[in-house]
Structure formats: C-alpha cells, structure tokens
C-alpha cells in the first residue's frame, strides 16, 4: 500500500449518471466534456501534488469513461453504479490520502484554483468536511 498523499482528487463521472445521462462524453469544444474537465484540473496549480483519479461505475457503458481517463493520464477506480460512497471507499483504500476532494464529472468547467482553495481551507481548519455547497456560494458545476 502506498503512503498517504495530502490530497486525493476524485472526479466522479459516469455515462449512466441520473442527473445528466451521457453528459460526461458529450462533445464540448471538440472533445468530450469529461476530458475538458480533466485537462482543466491538470493545469498547473496548487493541485500538483494531488493524486488524481476518475471514479466511475462498473457498468459496461462506462468502459469509454475508463479509456478516456487513462488516456488523459488519470488513475481509475470502478465501483457500484448506485453507491458513490462505496466507490469513494475503494478509492481511499487504493490511494490513501489525508483528504479527498470530490468533483462531479458533469461540470466540465471545474476550476483547479477553487478546488485548491477548498482543500487549503480544509487543511487549515482541520474540519471533518469542507465544501462550497452550504450555503451554495458558487454556480452549479463548480461544486467541491
């Protein structure tokens, strides 16, 4: 088992996502929306030391998500399509980290600086949970 990194950056993306079925592979600016998000999160930032992975389902429909993530150089963890927490648990066991940042793959405009800011706030305050959702302080799609 690897030693724990400070941050495990998890992008949750599935073709079967109920909120936006198929959105992760929809073309946007000439490439799949999920690839656009992964490239944005790979941009030089304070996330450089984070372990990056895509969490998707074990359904055959998500084989394309796995291929896309691996092509982009991201690790992949597959879990049950109906249990996000089980998938996150598997990810945490395979890639131990002090904190996990979850970004939804249906928001292709995710901001690496915002993810880093939330991660830094989490580290500074030593909170059990840190997010920008309660109250909602950023537009939908920029959830961390």
Image (cartoon, rainbow, N blue to C red):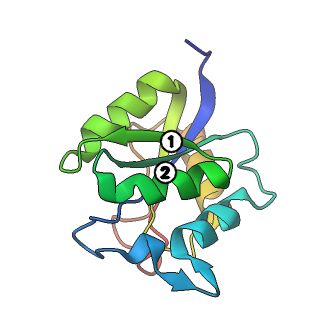
Q: Is residue 26 above or below residue 57?
A: below
Q: Is residue 43 above or below residue 67?
A: below
Q: Quadrant of the N terminus?
A: top right
Residue in front for this viewpoint, 127 or 105: 105
**Rendered location of residue 88, percent (x, y):** 36, 38
Q: Which residue is mark 1?
A: 76
Q: Are marks 1 and 2 in contact (CB under 8 Å)?
A: yes
Q: Is residue 85 left or right of residue 42?
A: left
Name which quarter of the figure residue 12 lies in. bottom left
Q: Residues within 10 Å of mark 2 (few under 14, many from 20)?
A: many
Check residue 133 in the rendering and tell me which mark sits there, or answer none. none
* Residue 103 showing in the rendered view: no
Q: Residues within 10 Å of mark 1 (few under 14, many from 20)?
A: some
The Cα atoms of the two marked residues, 1 and 2, are separated by: 6 Å
Q: Is residue 133 left or right of residue 38?
A: left
**Rendered location of residue 22, percent (x, y):** 35, 74
């Amino acid at each position: 088992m690897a030693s724990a990194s400070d941050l495990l950056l998890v992008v949750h993306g599935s073709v079967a996502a109920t909120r936006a079925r198929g959105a992760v592979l929809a073309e946007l600016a000439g490439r799949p929306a999920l690839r656009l998000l992964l490239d944005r999160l790979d941009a030089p930032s304070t996330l450089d030391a984070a372990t990056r992975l895509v969490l998707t389902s074990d359904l055959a429909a998500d084989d394309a998500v796995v291929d896309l993530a691996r092509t982009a150089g991201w690790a992949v963890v597959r879990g049950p399509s109906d249990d996000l927490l089980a998938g996150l648990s598997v990810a945490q066991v395979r890639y131990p980290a002090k904190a996990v940042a979850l970004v939804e793959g249906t928001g292709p405009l995710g901001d690496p600086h915002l993810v880093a800011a939330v991660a830094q706030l989490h580290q500074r305050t030593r909170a059990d949970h840190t997010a920008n959702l309660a109250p909602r302080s950023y537009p939908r799609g920029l959830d961390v």
